[in-house]
Image (cartoon, helix red, strand yellow):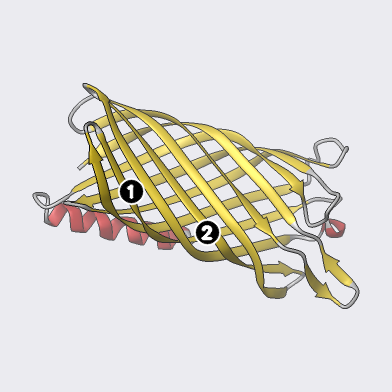
């Protein structure tokens, strides 16, 4: 997963450096602090909450009216609570997201550009808690095509803002427990990133923003007389980072 992201980012950087007059490449790295709230956690009546920090990398490559982007987020547990219990130190919770997309600029007004397009999203979720499935290590892997929208604003000299929204309403998930996998589970996944940037120089910009999203996994049958309930969650966080303009 991380190797695939590194390879794609390296190839994009190499392409940009070979044709600097044809395109603009921006690379943003961010740290985020926030949390995930579960309305249902493998069960209709089980709720949970997770505080977490995230590392986020976002690359954007523009050429005339075309925009190509890729982002990777790795969210890591700080604390986790399920139901009415206390934080369980033996619990685990991690979430990774990878998205690739391409968009076309269909609107340009004074100080604003709007892009719309299509991409492909992948998500990995790993969790373990004594109150969930007997404390067994559990993982979900999801993927699917996603619509995306990108909006860019020029607010003032040196100040810009942008928004990236992705929507995958027909996500397909795979569930793994005790080396047994159940595939083709219906669900969905959505995400957003909003940021405000201040250009420190022609090459660097400081960034502050927010990010978040949600995901849903439908109920399915794991084994005979063993139905796994639905999972519904939303996450959000504040971000701080740096953007490099190439």
* Image quadrant occupied by the C terminus: top left
Instruction: Identify the residue at horizontal 45%, vertical 46% (top origin).
Output: 165
Please state which of residues 114 and 57 is positioned toward the viewer in this rendering.
114
Residue 113: image x %, image y %?
A: 27, 41
The disc at residue 95 is none
Q: Is residue 87 toward the left or the right of residue 7 in the image?
A: right
Q: Residue furthest right?
A: 225
Q: Label 1's element? A: strand
Please state which of residues 140 and 105 is positioned toward the viewer in this rendering.
105
Res. 199 visible in picture: no
**Dot placed on the residue nearer the N-terminal end, 2 or 1:** 1
Q: Residue furthest bottom?
A: 224
For disc 1, the marked residue is 59
Q: Quadrant of residue 11?
A: bottom left
Q: Quadrant of residue 159?
A: top left
Please state which of residues 241 and 154 is positioned toward the viewer in this rendering.
154
Is disc 2 surrounded by few (<14), some (14 to 19) or many (20+) residues within 10 Å? many
Q: Is residue 133 toward the left or the right of residue 234 in the image?
A: right
For disc 2, the marked residue is 168
Residue 161: image x %, image y %?
A: 34, 31
Residue 197: image x %, image y %?
A: 33, 28
Q: Label 2's element? A: strand
Res. 23 visible in picture: yes
Instruction: Identify the residue at horizontal 87%, vertical 58% (top origin).
Output: 134
Is disc 1 surrounded by few (<14), some (14 to 19) or many (20+) residues within 10 Å? many
């Amino acid at each position: 997963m991380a190797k695939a992201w590194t390879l794609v980012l390296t190839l994009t950087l190499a392409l940009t450096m070979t044709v600097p007059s044809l395109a603009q490449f921006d690379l943003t790295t961010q740290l985020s602090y926030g949390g995930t709230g579960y309305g249902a956690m493998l069960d209709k009546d089980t709720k949970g909450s997770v505080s977490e920090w995230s590392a986020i990398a976002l690359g954007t490559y523009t050429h005339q009216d075309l925009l190509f982007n890729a982002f990777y987020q790795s969210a890591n547990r700080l604390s986790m609570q399920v139901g009415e219990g206390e934080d369980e130190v033996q619990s685990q919770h991690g979430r990774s997201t990878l998205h690739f997309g391409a968009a076309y600029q269909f609107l340009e007004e004074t100080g604003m550009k709007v892009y719309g397009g299509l991409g492909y999203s992948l998500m990995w979720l790993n969790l373990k808690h004594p109150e969930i499935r007997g404390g067994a290590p559990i993982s979900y892997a999801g993927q699917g095509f996603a619509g995306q929208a990108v909006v860019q604003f020029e607010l003032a000299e040196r100040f810009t803002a942008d928004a990236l929204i992705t929507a995958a309403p027909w996500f397909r998930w795979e569930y793994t427990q005790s080396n047994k996998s159940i595939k083709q589970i219906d669900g969905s996944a959505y995400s957003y990133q909003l940021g405000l940037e201040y250009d420190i120089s022609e090459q660097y910009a400081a960034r502050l923003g927010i990010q978040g999203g949600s995901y849903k996994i439908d109920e399915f049958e794991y084994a005979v007389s063993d139905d796994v309930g639905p999972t519904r969650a939303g996450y959000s966080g504040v971000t701080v980072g740096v953007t490099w303009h190439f």
